[in-house]
């Protein structure tokens, strides 16, 4: 687990999260600014969740009792963390902002 894991996570999250969420948000919200805020918030939360759950999964899978964990299991754990982190970030954005970007006023 090093900088390559974080860089790979960043590229995966940008390629598979930001671009599709941004395109869908532009179509639905009809505002580039609000779509960017929504997509950037989801992407930042997804990246944080990916790295945090990747490190946690690596730490949990390296126990001497269970033996070395597989890379597939680690990536699935990190990907689940990315989805959860993105959803949590968007939820917190809606909870703590006065005007959430997905509501039209």
Image (spheres, helix red, strand yellow):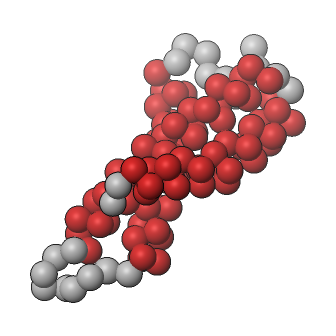
Left or right relative to 65: residue 54: right
Quick one: 60 or 84, which is closer to the camera? 60
Is residue 87 visible to the viewer in this orientation of the structure?
no
Image height of 86 relative to 81, above or below: above
Q: Residue at x 82, y 22 (%)?
A: 31
Quick one: 35 or 57, which is closer to the camera? 57
Q: Residue 36: where, in percent of width, then height?
A: 70, 27
Is residue 34 visible to the viewer in this orientation of the structure?
yes
Give the position of the N terminus as an image quadrant: bottom left
Image height of 36 relative to 87, above or below: above
Left or right relative to 44: residue 3: left
Left or right relative to 14: residue 25: right
Left or right relative to 20: residue 87: left
**Residue reaching furthest left?**
64
Image height of 56 relative to 45, above or below: below
Number of marks present in the image shown: 0
Q: Which residue is drawn at 44% across and 50% down?
A: 6
Q: Residue 2: where, in percent of width, then height?
A: 35, 55
Q: Which residue is drawn at 57% across and 39% down?
A: 42
Quick one: 99 or 46, which is closer to the camera? 46
Quick one: 78 or 105, which is closer to the camera? 78
Query: Picture quarter containing residue 98?
Result: top right
Q: Residue 25: where, in percent of width, then height?
A: 77, 36
Give the position of the C terminus as an image quadrant: top right
Q: Residue at x 46, y 21 (%)?
A: 96
Query: Picture quarter containing residue 4?
Result: bottom left
């Amino acid at each position: 687990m090093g900088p390559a894991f974080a860089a790979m996570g960043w590229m995966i999250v940008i390629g598979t999260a930001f671009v599709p969420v941004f395109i869908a948000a532009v179509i639905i919200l009809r505002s580039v600014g609000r779509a960017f805020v929504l997509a950037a918030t989801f992407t930042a939360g997804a990246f944080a969740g990916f790295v945090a759950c990747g490190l946690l999964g690596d730490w949990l899978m390296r126990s001497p009792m269970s033996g070395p964990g597989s890379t597939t299991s680690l990536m699935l754990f990190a990907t689940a963390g990315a989805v959860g982190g993105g959803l949590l970030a968007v939820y917190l954005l809606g909870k703590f902002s006065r005007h959430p970007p997905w509501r039209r006023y």
